[in-house]
Amino acid sequence: SQQGEEDPQALSIQEGENATMNCSYKTSINNLQWYRQNSGRGLVHLILIRSNEREKHSGRLRVTLDTSKKSSSLLITASRAADTASYFCATAFYGNNRLAFGKGNQVVVIP
Amino acid sequence: GAVVSQHPSWVICKSGTSVKIECRSLDFQATTMFWYRQFPKQSLMLMATSNEGSKATYEQGVEKDKFLINHASLTLSTLTVTSAHPEDSSFYICSARDLQGQGGYSNQPQHFGDGTRLSIL
């Protein structure tokens, strides 16, 4: 999982399998966001989930948020080789413009 | 929509040179833009928050005189790395939020440029 004291996670899966990655945070948030970064590129926004939401879907992506455990998960279903990337969660706080990024999860999808 | 253009994408220059990086929001207005630095296989480190028409807000440990930020319009912010040295070599990324996005400003995602790879020899 991201943040905390854990090392960045690396996940290698076969095409067609599901990929799940986790993120934890420490303080109350306004929302939590997931981003994807292809090697050497900028970040692409995937999903934003607000603090009063528990689950959100976008295509093959499913994000959950558990504010009692201060954690979130990102599920990619039926993965494709093009999903190979690093995935970052980022938390937004009330009254603050900034995002706090997790350490990232590197996902490799093998064709 | 919500495209952020960052230029240049790659810079190689000699030590002591000053390098300017531009970040433009192409189809939306952004009163606030953000500058990040990223080392290989690491997460993004926020360097500063760029505010249109006012001084940038720098994170602790980031030298204001080293990393000059100018946000002169609602669509352009620039980061100038002054008198760059090899230790300044890194991947620099900017982002911006849409002032008019749905759901309120506080629930807007950040839109990122493609980054600038800076290599100082």
Image (cartoon, helix red, strand yellow):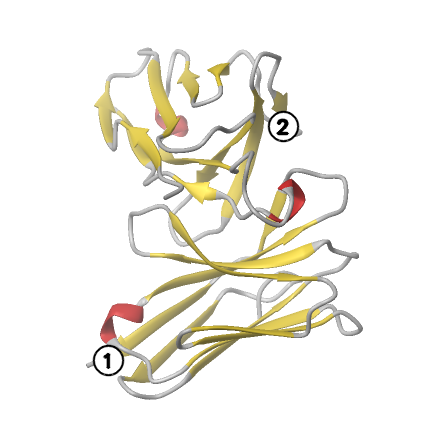
- Closer to the camera, A95 or A7? A95
Dot 2 surroundings within 10 Å: few (below 14), some, or many (20 or more)?
A: few
Q: Amino acid at mark 2?
A: Gly
Nearer to us of marks 1 and 2 is 1
**Circle 1: is it few (<14), some (14-19), or many (20+) Cα within 10 Å?**
some
* Residue drawn 43% across the image and 23% down it: B75
- Element marked by disc 1: strand
Quarter of the picture holding the N terminus of chain B: top left
Q: Residue at x 58, y 65 (%)?
A: A2
Q: Is residue B44 left or right of residue B16?
A: right
* Image point (48%, 28%), residue name: B29
Circle 1 sits on which residue?
A110
SS type, badge 2:
loop
Q: What x and y, as percent, mark residue B70?
A: 49, 14
Q: Is residue A41 above or below residue B70?
A: below
User: Do callouts 1 and 2 mark residues in contact (Cβ within 8 Å)?
Assistant: no
> Alpha carbon of mark 1 to alpha carbon of mark 2: how far?
40 Å
Image side of residue B115 versus residue B37, left or right: left
Which of the 4 image quadrants contains residue A86?
A: bottom left
Chain bearing tag 2 is: B
Image side of residue B8 versus residue B18, left or right? left
Q: Which mark is residue B61?
A: 2
How many numbered badges does the structure rendering display?
2
Please name the amino acid that badge 1 sits on.
Answer: Ile
